[in-house]
């Protein structure tokens, strides 16, 4: 990345806020208490504490910016704003409860409907992935920053899959891609980070229930590293919509693999896309 990013102040705040959120999460790590939200996903005290801390940090520097956060009330006025922070204060709550470490804090910034930067922070292990689209991406571990460059594999395809649940649609895509290796992981952000690091190649999540906070920061990091992110139709993900759901899921891959992956998705005849023909 350049010595001075065009979004240097925003990136600094995003990194600081992610680490602050991470401290709130790790202070509660080990607790297995949770509630069930509408839709059936769990939410914990750690989710709420991280959300509050992140919002406070962003507002300290950018008090006029809008924030779309999974665990807080949405402000419909945000759709008129050119800038929007998109926050998932704890992505991978099931992994947090399972205590396997594969959860992250994700913070992205959207400008004019497109992601411009993102931070994905794994507090268990202290790995921070950051990227500014058009400028580059890096990962910081133990105080050392290493540039991220997603690369097309020379042979075979490594598919990132969910650790917490199986998916027949993903299995169908894997067969069509002739995947040679599957790598399970929690957190959308950490899945995309694996591709950004060049240790995985493809991630397909063909569901209608993920939202902008699930995809914003991961997209920014992976695209900044040279990768590709679309929905499962191959169309750009949209942001700052009145309804924040990403109705056609997410597809992420290393450079040079989009056409091949979309062809595999088409052959797999996924229910999500079959029933959604003519929509969106």
Image (cartoon, rainbow, N blue to C red):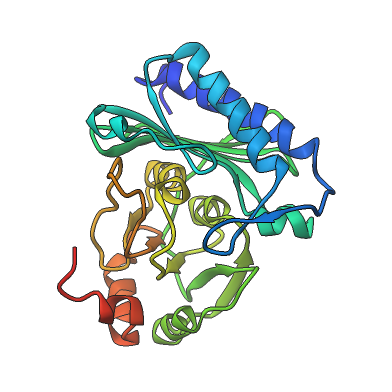
- Say which residue appears at 80% left-offset and 44% top-offset: 29
- Say which residue appears at 33% left-offset and 62% top-offset: 247
Q: Position of residue 144 (x, y in %)?
A: 66, 30
Between residue 76 and residue 83, name the one nearer to us: 76
- Say which residue appears at 35% left-offset and 30% top-offset: 84
The quadrant in which the N terminus is found is top left
Between residue 179 and residue 241, name the one nearer to us: 241
Residue 223 vertical placement versus 162 (above, below)? above
The image quarter containing residue 115 is top left
Residue 144 vertical placement versus 199 (above, below)? above
The image quarter containing residue 129 is top right
Q: Position of residue 194 (x, y in %)?
A: 55, 55
Asked whether residue 71 is in view, the answer is yes
Side of 108 where 16 appears, left or right: right
- Say which residue appears at 44% left-offset and 81% top-offset: 169
The quadrant in which the C terminus is found is bottom left
């Amino acid at each position: 990345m350049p010595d001075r990013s065009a979004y240097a102040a925003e990136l600094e705040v995003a990194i600081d806020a992610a680490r602050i959120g991470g401290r709130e999460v790790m202070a509660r790590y080990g607790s297995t208490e949770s509630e069930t939200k509408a839709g059936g996903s769990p939410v914990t005290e750690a989710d709420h504490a991280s959300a509050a801390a992140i919002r406070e940090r962003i507002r300290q520097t950018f008090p006029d910016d809008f924030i779309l956060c999974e665990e807080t009330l949405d402000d419909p006025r945000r759709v008129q704003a050119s800038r929007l922070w998109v926050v998932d204060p704890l992505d991978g709550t099931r992994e947090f409860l399972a205590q396997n470490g594969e959860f992250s804090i994700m913070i992205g910034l959207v400008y004019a409907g497109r992601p411009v930067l993102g931070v994905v922070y794994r507090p268990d292990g202290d790995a921070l992935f950051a990227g500014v689209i058009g400028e580059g991406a890096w990962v910081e571990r133990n105080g050392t920053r290493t540039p991220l460059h997603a690369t097309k594999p020379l042979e075979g395809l490594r598919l990132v899959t969910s650790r917490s649940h199986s998916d027949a649609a993903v299995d169908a895509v894997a067969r069509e891609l002739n995947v040679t290796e599957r790598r399970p992981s929690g957190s959308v952000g950490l899945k995309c980070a694996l591709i950004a690091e060049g240790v995985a190649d493809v991630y397909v999540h063909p569901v209608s229930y993920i939202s902008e906070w699930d995809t914003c920061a991961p997209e920014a990091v992976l695209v900044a590293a040279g990768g590709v992110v679309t929905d499962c139709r191959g169309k750009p993900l949209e942001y700052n919509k009145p309804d924040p759901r990403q109705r056609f899921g997410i597809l992420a891959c290393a450079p040079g693999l989009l056409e091949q992956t979309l062809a595999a998705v088409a052959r797999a005849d996924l229910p999500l896309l079959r029933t959604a023909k003519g929509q969106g």
